Amino acid sequence: MVIKGNMRGNGAQLAHYLTRQGENDQIRILEVDGRADADQDSLIVTLEGMSLKEQLTKSKQGLYHAQINPAYEEDRQMTDEDWHKAADILEHALGFEGQRRAIVLHEKKGRLHAHVVWERYDAETGKMKTISHNYKAHDQARQEIEKYLNQEPTPTRNKSRDDIKEVMTGLWDKTETGADFLKEVKNAGFCVAAGSGKRPFMVVDDKGRSFDLVRQLKGVRTKQVRERLDGEKLMDEKDAIELMRQLGNQKRLAENEPEQQAETAHRWKANPETAKEFARNRDDIFAGEKKKDTSRSFSANASDNHASIKQRAESFVVNETMADKEKSANPFAEKTHAFAENRNTLTASQIKRQQLINEMKSQLKTSYHRQRDKRRDF
């Protein structure tokens, strides 16, 4: 698990970032100021309201924005209650107990991570809550969350990172063409994929972890990598991560198979009747599968002329089904996308939201003048 965060201002911009589809597969608002049924408008108004509290102090950073990134596959095992608990633990480590907050879940490249935003303004003291040594607080919270959720402890230093750098640099130096480099990388158990933005090339290991390829090549610049790999077809990073996960899982299962076979043999030796029953069932299953294979082969040969049409039709149906599932699984995705596309068009909800924000600004201005008059009286 990785936790990072820092102070920031401009709640409006942060709210739009958290609700913008962008590269995210799905977006789900988990909590806004204690409400589990909050929508996008509530999130925007709340974060803008938190940010406006800056006007009561000299600070320009009235928010604290943190990200909680669980390890691969462990993110899928976390329930809503687990995400809330993780936010509670981090909240305690940072000293933000009782502060207003919002939690938004993002799914990106098949992975889930949480964005948690707290209001720094303390209504009791009239000051912003200070955060010192936030990295230590993050590390403390990470250890406690992993222990609570029974997750694999994250090493304080990525021991495999130097190994990857040594391997990638060695393969780069021993090859001259992009094709040879990609072949050697594949033989070493990695995959080079196409990234985006400032990280155009990624390398993915057998656990589905992706790293910036250029950073793993000592003394090599992005321009050199781009020149060598020019013309080479690279898999998308998201697809590469999923593929390497599957291959890695198959490899680990194969490595553990001898132990499992030994355990099974021992169990069957102790229960001979169970072994005989399994053998009979296996023969029946094999005979049935053989008939199915023959039928499949006949069907395939009979429909060769229609294969391309059928493939396109199946692809269309799958894409339509996936789109429907995405909409049903994430009720906010369609609304978020529409908001991002039409954010410059005033709608009834936006007008109402702007009215609420103007009211908050007016109240904050009045409160500020009252505090200033009190200080002058003293």
Image (cartoon, grey):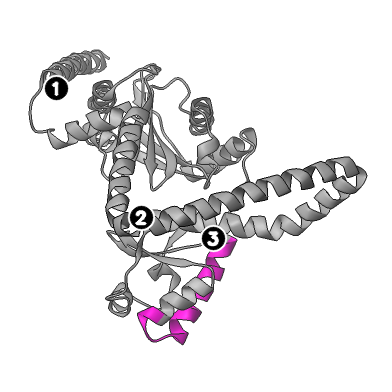
Q: Tag 1 or tag 3, which sits nearer the N-term?
A: 3
Q: Distance between the residues labelled 3 and 1?
A: 47 Å
In the rendered structure, the answer to whether residue 147 lies left or right of residue 72 reads right
Question: With 191 as the anchor, is 10 left or right in this view?
Answer: left
Mark 1: few, some, or many residues within 10 Å (few <14, many ≥20)? some
Q: Earlier in the sequence, mark 1 or mark 2?
A: 2
Secondary structure of residue under mark 3: loop
**Front residue (pair 215, 257):** 257
Instruction: Tell me the distance, in whole angstroms, between the alpha carbons under discs 1 and 2.
Output: 55 Å
Residue 38 visible somewhere in the drawing: yes
Q: Report crowding for label 2: few under 14, some 14 to 19, many 20 or more residues within 10 A (C-alpha).
A: few
Query: Where does the image place residue 203, in percent across and percent down from the top left?
Result: 43, 65
- State whether the magenta stretch is mostly helix, strand or loop: helix
Q: What secondary structure is marked by label 2?
A: loop
- Depth check, mark 1 against mark 2: the one in front is 2
Task: Pick the quarter of the image with the C terminus.
Answer: top left
Q: Given the current orientation, which residue lies at the most extreme right position?
A: 270
* CA distance for labels 3 and 2: 37 Å
Magenta stretch in the rendered image: 159-179
Place of residue 30 in the rendered image (x, y in percent of width and height, measured from the top left): 40, 26
First along the sequence among labels 3 and 2: 3
Q: Which of 114 and 337 is in front in this view?
A: 337
Q: Residue at x 66, y 50 (%)?
A: 286
Residue bearing mark 2: 303
Which residue bears the numbered disc 3?
206
Viewer-nearest of discs 3 and 1: 3
Q: Label 2 sits on what residue type? A: Ser
Residue occupied by mark 1: 350
The three-letter code of the residue at mark 3 reads Asp
Residue that sits furthest to the left in the current view: 345
Identify which amino acid the numbered label 1 is placed on.
Gln
